């Protein structure tokens, strides 16, 4: 037993690092108007393409340098985190609610409910996600709400498949039978007894999906299909960085690092939380 | 065998018809009047009605679908709103670039993934295998978009040895008759051009290939390890074959089948990935065109691109199914 405990000690460090970065980024996103050193939209061509602070030629106050229009990179990254997290939470929660509910119903009730839901999932997943996204964005138009809807509409199947399989296992267990004998109704058993047991998986998937949503938003804002206004987004900054890559590499590198750390943290956090909540491992 | 192929072809047609129905419905429920988008401001109601009749939009939805579908069968995909050109022509002009990119990416993925799998299976249980597992994990958890950006930074800026923009250096004279530049440059023995084309293709192809290479390495290594426990392998070892010979001559043949099926499915995802990777590397393929079409809300063009992609995916699945049937002895004789 002690052995197993030691083996799962390590993920706790991962959990703290991942959680720490997400907390930091989230705090920056929430407090953006107060903590950003400059206005993210103010252009000053005299201060164009300033390098980050440790390189000669940097100006004090512009920690990570500026882009080709002289806008402060750090402030743009902090403001860009707002949109990243907004999409991450809204899209992942929407996909989670739809997918987990359907998965729980399919797995727990089985029978025709399972057949219909599983069939829909199969058809849904046979459509390549990129084409699906192109069609959806074409129909919905560009903008933040379209991005959120598109992610939820495409990715609910991820939740549905896993939760269905887990609910199926749970539904055959003795405690469900005893709940029935104790006079619990089917729906009540599903919500009060089965749901808490599949919750660790739901939380792990939710965290993973937030990472995916952040990548998708970055891709869509990179190709100019996300926010319609000139609010800074990580993907938008990457697009600018891509254009001026030979003159100002930092405009590409810093948003890339932010994206990397955030996506990695969400997936590590998901794994860690799952182990933390799992009664067998705990 | 014959019957199997016929059934497979029929299901393929049904699938394509289903895709056509979905695309038609989705595009028609799109908010915004396509006619209003085509006309200049200040057009009269009579103008609108005339254009509506011209495009058959005054008929019932059911009739519209069959007029549209009949047109598609005859190769009439409509006219692009933003580029004012025939959609099929535009799509066919860009498709070869995307095909060359995806096939090269698939080739790299199979090469890398296969190599890692064979080395991992040979060195099973050692630190080398664990190292390969770590590389696989990293390659899998990072999406191709981020791989592309990392490659641009390393091989475009830090050590600029590969092209990171476009399909070919703009200063070169291209003597090509088709859009299959790479293929034609080899046929014409213009290896200077082949080299330039490959230098531009390599980075985007590698970005697309890395996640797939990791999947191939993982699955093939697992199958190889299972096959290596079987009796006939023991016999081969008794015959005095070296471990590498055993893997390459005996085990690989039988372990490759599950990987082959997986490659088929994953190849369609890889082609989907070209949409964003082409944009990232300013590569003039179908995916780049698709993004322009969405930005301009060019519905006829989007419709054409989605249908061509869908056709491609269905054909790849068909090819995988058929080759699976040919390679698997149980199905070949059954």
Image: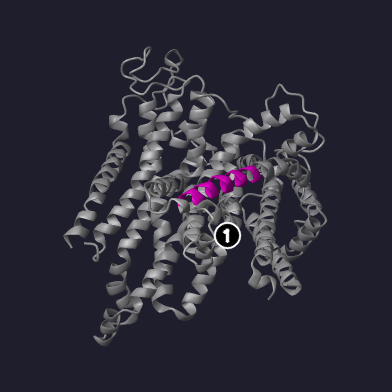
Q: What residue did someone put label 1 on?
A: B250
Can you say whether A203 is above or below B101 in the image? below
Name the image colouring: one colour
Q: Which of these two is toward me, B144 or B184?
A: B184
| Quadrant of the image containing the N terminus of chain A | bottom left
Residue A13 visible within the image: yes
Q: In this figure, what is the number of numbered marks?
A: 1
Residue at left offset 44%, top offset 20%? A43
**A95 within the magenta span:** no
- Rate crowding at label 1 as few (under 14), some (14 to 19) or many (20 or more) other CA atoms within 10 Å: some
| Quadrant of the image containing the C terminus of chain A | bottom left
- The answer to which quarter of the image holds residue A33 is top left
Q: Position of residue A36 (x, y in %)?
A: 31, 29
Q: Which of these two is toward me, A123 or B126?
A: B126
Can you say whether A24 is above or below B223 in the image? above
Residue B297 visible within the image: no
- The answer to which quarter of the image holds residue A2 is bottom left
**B112 within the magenta span:** yes
Q: Position of residue B227 (x, y in %)?
A: 50, 63
Q: Which of these two is toward me, B149 or B20?
A: B149
The residues colored magenta run B103-120
Residue at left offset 54%, top offset 50%? B114
Can you say whether B170 is above or below B61 in the image? above
**Label 1 chain ID:** B
């Amino acid at each position: 037993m002690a052995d197993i405990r030691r083996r799962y000690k390590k993920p706790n460090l991962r959990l703290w690092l991942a959680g720490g970065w997400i907390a930091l980024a989230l705090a920056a996103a929430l407090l953006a108007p107060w903590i950003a050193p400059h206005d993210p939209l103010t252009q000053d061509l005299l201060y164009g393409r300033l390098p980050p602070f440790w390189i000669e030629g940097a100006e004090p106050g512009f920690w990570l340098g500026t882009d080709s229009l002289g806008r402060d990179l750090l402030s743009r990254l902090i403001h860009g985190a707002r949109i990243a997290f907004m999409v991450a939470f809204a899209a992942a929660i929407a996909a989670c609610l739809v997918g987990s509910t359907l998965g729980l119903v399919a797995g727990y009730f089985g029978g025709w409910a399972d057949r219909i839901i599983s069939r829909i999932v199969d058809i849904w997943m046979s459509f390549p996600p990129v084409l699906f996204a192109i069609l959806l964005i074409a129909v919905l138009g560009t903008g933040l709400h379209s991005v959120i809807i598109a992610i939820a509409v495409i990715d609910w199947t991820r939740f549905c498949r896993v939760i269905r399989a887990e609910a199926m296992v749970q539904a055959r267990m003795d405690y469900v039978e005893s709940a029935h004998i104790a006079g619990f109704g089917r729906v009540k058993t599903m919500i009060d007894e089965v749901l808490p047991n599949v919750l660790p998986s739901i939380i792990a998937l939710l965290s993973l999906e937030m990472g995916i949503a952040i990548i998708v938003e970055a891709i869509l804002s990179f190709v100019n299909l996300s926010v319609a206004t000139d609010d800074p987004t990580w993907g938008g900054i990457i697009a600018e960085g891509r254009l001026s890559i030979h003159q100002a590499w930092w405009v590409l590198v810093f948003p890339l690092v932010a994206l990397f750390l955030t996506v990695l943290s969400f997936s590590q956090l998901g794994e860690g939380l799952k182990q933390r909540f799992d009664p067998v491992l705990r | 065998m014959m019957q199997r192929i016929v059934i497979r072809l029929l299901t393929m047609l049904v699938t394509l018809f289903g895709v056509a129905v979905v695309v038609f419905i989705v595009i028609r429920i799109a908010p915004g009047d396509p006619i209003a988008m085509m006309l200049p401001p200040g057009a009269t109601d009579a103008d609108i009605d005339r254009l509506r009749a011209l495009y058959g939009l005054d008929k019932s939805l059911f009739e519209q679908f069959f007029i549209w579908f009949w047109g598609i069968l005859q190769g009439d995909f409509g006219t692009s709103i933003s580029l004012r050109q025939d959609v099929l022509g535009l799509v066919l002009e860009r498709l070869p670039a995307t095909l060359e990119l995806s096939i090269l990416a698939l080739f790299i993925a199979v090469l890398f993934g296969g190599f890692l799998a064979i080395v991992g299976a040979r060195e099973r249980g050692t630190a080398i295998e664990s190292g390969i597992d770590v590389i696989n994990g990293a390659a899998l958890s990072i999406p191709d978009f981020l791989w592309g950006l990392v490659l641009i930074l390393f091989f475009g800026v830090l050590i600029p040895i590969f092209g990171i923009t476009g399909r070919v250096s703009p200063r070169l004279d291209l003597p090509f008759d088709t859009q299959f530049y790479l293929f034609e440059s080899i046929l014409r023995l213009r290896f200077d051009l082949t080299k330039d084309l490959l230098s531009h293709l390599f980075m985007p192809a590698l970005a697309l290939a890395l996640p797939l290479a990791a999947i191939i390495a993982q699955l093939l290594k697992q199958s190889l390890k299972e096959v290596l426990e079987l009796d006939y392998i023991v016999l081969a070892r008794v015959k005095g074959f070296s471990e590498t010979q055993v893997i390459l001559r005996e085990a690989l043949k039988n372990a490759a089948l599950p990987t082959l099926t997986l490659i088929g499915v994953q190849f369609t995802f890889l082609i989907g990935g070209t949409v964003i990777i082409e944009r990232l590397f300013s590569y003039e393929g179908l995916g780049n065109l698709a993004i322009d079409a969405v930005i301009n809300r060019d519905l006829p063009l989007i419709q054409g691109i989605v249908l061509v992609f869908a056709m491609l995916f269905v054909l790849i699945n068909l090819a995988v199914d058929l080759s699976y049937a040919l390679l698997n002895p149980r199905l070949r004789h059954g």
